[in-house]
Image (tube, grey):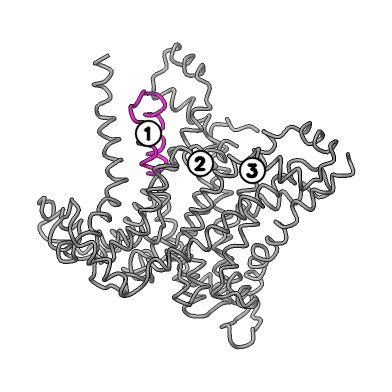
Amino acid sequence: MKNRQHYGYFFILPYFLIFAVFGLFPILYTFFLSVYKWDGMMPKVFIGFDNFKRLLTDKYFYLATGNTIKIWLFNFIPQIAAALLLSCIFTFNRIRGMKFFRAAYYLPNLITAASVGLLFNLLFNGDKSAVNYILVQSGILKEPFAFFSSPEFTSGLVSYIQWWMWFGYTTVIVMAGMTTVDNSLYEAAMSDGATKMQTFRKITVPLIKPTLIYLTITSIIGGMQLFDVPATLTNANGDPQKSILTTTMYIYNQGFKSYNYGYACAVSVGLFAIIAVLSVFSFRAMRRRGDMYDE
Amino acid sequence: MNRIKWRLVPVYVLLVLLLVISIVPFYLVIVNSTHSSFDIVTKLNLWIGGSLRDNYEKMQSNVNIWNGFKNSLLIAVPFTFFTGYFGAMTAYGFAKYRFKGKKGLYWLVLCSMMIPAQLSIVGFYQLNLKLNLLNSYIPFIFPGIANASAVFFLRGIVEQSIPDSMLEAARMEGATEFRIFNRMILPCIMPGVATMCIFNFVTCWNNYMGPLILITDNKKYTMPVMIAMIKGLYLSNYGAMYLAIAIAVVPIIIVYLFLSKYIINGLTIGSDK
């Protein structure tokens, strides 16, 4: 029967053919173009690392990357906090309708982000938007607030939308991590007189650390590529005052609005490096604390 | 018993609050899609109104939203089929055969899962430009064959649920390798494949940036691209805009009502690794 082992190649062949064309080639070509100046029409001009020199002094690149990191932090930290709190509530108490609550919290994650962007635009934009109506009628605000003229508010709203779309998912994943924790560990801790908070900090958190690392890294990779919501929430240029211009929006604008393909590729490579550094950094930082991670 | 319940009151308050936060925006979309633009800007509507037909006619006068719906289906259905079938096939190849270079190739699959896809958009665009695939659905459908996360999840399922003895028995009876895969393996791992397919369908359906870059013919716009450009088209016609969002959102909610159990369970397949 051993002579059949080479059939494995036939089974994985279609995957690697398509991967080579639609996955690998675009990546390699992006790296290749990053050392050229090219508008898509004229011949490519090799300019070495000039694109990267420009990148290092490009204030829009720093602005966009700063925005992206800020939006990510302000949605990821509340997301983890909410997920830990909800997971504890659901795991340690008998909550009626737990599955219903959890399913409802996850719903926003399934909805097209482009629709979500437009939806929140409609809810907040203008003097007579639903949110202004509620705030004015209930007396919280004296007069309508121009939400999308405030950079702080708009950036915060993107963080909120991202939180809203992802806290249910994060809760499901954290809960799955918690249920794998052996119940006898809690019982032992309780019988030793540990408080709930102590058990949580000393037992639950260290044991779900692999789950938390997984969530952090996948969230960095996704969060640093943020595009759909900020691109559809306001005017697609990241306004007001470029406060929600993200790095991926900047790549899109450089490539497909200004036709600086070479430079857009250099920005992509730069963002790629940032994602790699952040992922490795957070992986190391989280692994070190507590030494519970062993595999 | 009563004391325990009282202690949980603040907890339930919090849970209900989060429930409201999660659901109310969708409720407002559905309600507002049945009100006139005048009603929408002059009061807060909490119940269904009578302008649905009116909004529908206004919406359809500018774009045919069902065309976007159809286009999204034309991409998402074959894409999902490819991720399921070829994902299972690749996973099976990795799980049950021993061949040279397997480790390295599987490592490549795992790496491609971590590589941020949107970063190679310029390369992706140029590739399709050269292959003459702009305004074609091929660049969105065929990558389904090389879906790394499908391979990763299904490999685990194949390893858990298919014993080697089963393959040996089938080989003894003279079945070819592909027949074994199609007739035995695939039906066995079908529940896992189906779960995987739900997620891939949703991801594909929601894809905004890809079609935004490659599709310029407005007859070929997908749902997310159509929704995103609606703001410019309808200006202050809020009723029509809400209705368009409702048409994009409600089918997903209906499907979720039926499949939420599988979807929630499916979420955790990957994370416990």
In front of the other: label 1 or label 2? 2
Asked whether, in this view, residue A150 is left or right of residue A181, the answer is left
* Element type where label 2 sits in the image: helix
Check if mark 3 and mark 2 are on a common chain. Answer: yes
Mark 3 or 2, nearer chain start: 3
Q: Is residue A95 magenta?
A: yes
Q: Quadrant of the C terminus of chain B?
A: top right
As drawn, A43 above or below B65:
below
Let me know if marks 1 and 2 both belong to one chain: no
Front-most of B4 and A73? B4
Give the residue drawn at x 13%, y 58%: B43
Q: Secondary structure at mark 1?
A: helix
According to the picture, the residue beneath numbered tag 2 turns out to be B267
- Residue B78 pos. (x, y %): 57, 59
Question: Is residue A247 among what the camera can see?
Answer: no
Q: A89 or B29: which is nearer to us?
A: B29
What residue sits 56% from the left and 77% below the top?
Answer: A261
Estimate the spatial distance between the alpha carbons at disc 1 and disc 2, rounded to whole Å: 19 Å
In the rendered structure, find residue A85 and report the number of the disc placed on it.
Answer: 1
Find residue A63 and report its horizontal and vertical position in percent: 42, 66
The residue carrying pointer 3 sits among few (fewer than 14), some (14 to 19) or many (20 or more) residues within 10 Å by Cα, namely many
Q: Which residues are magenta?
A: A77-106
Residue B71 locus on image (x, y percent): 48, 66
Q: Quote the CA–CA distance across marks 3 and 2.
A: 13 Å
Badge 2 amino acid: Leu
User: Callout 3, which amino acid?
Assistant: Leu
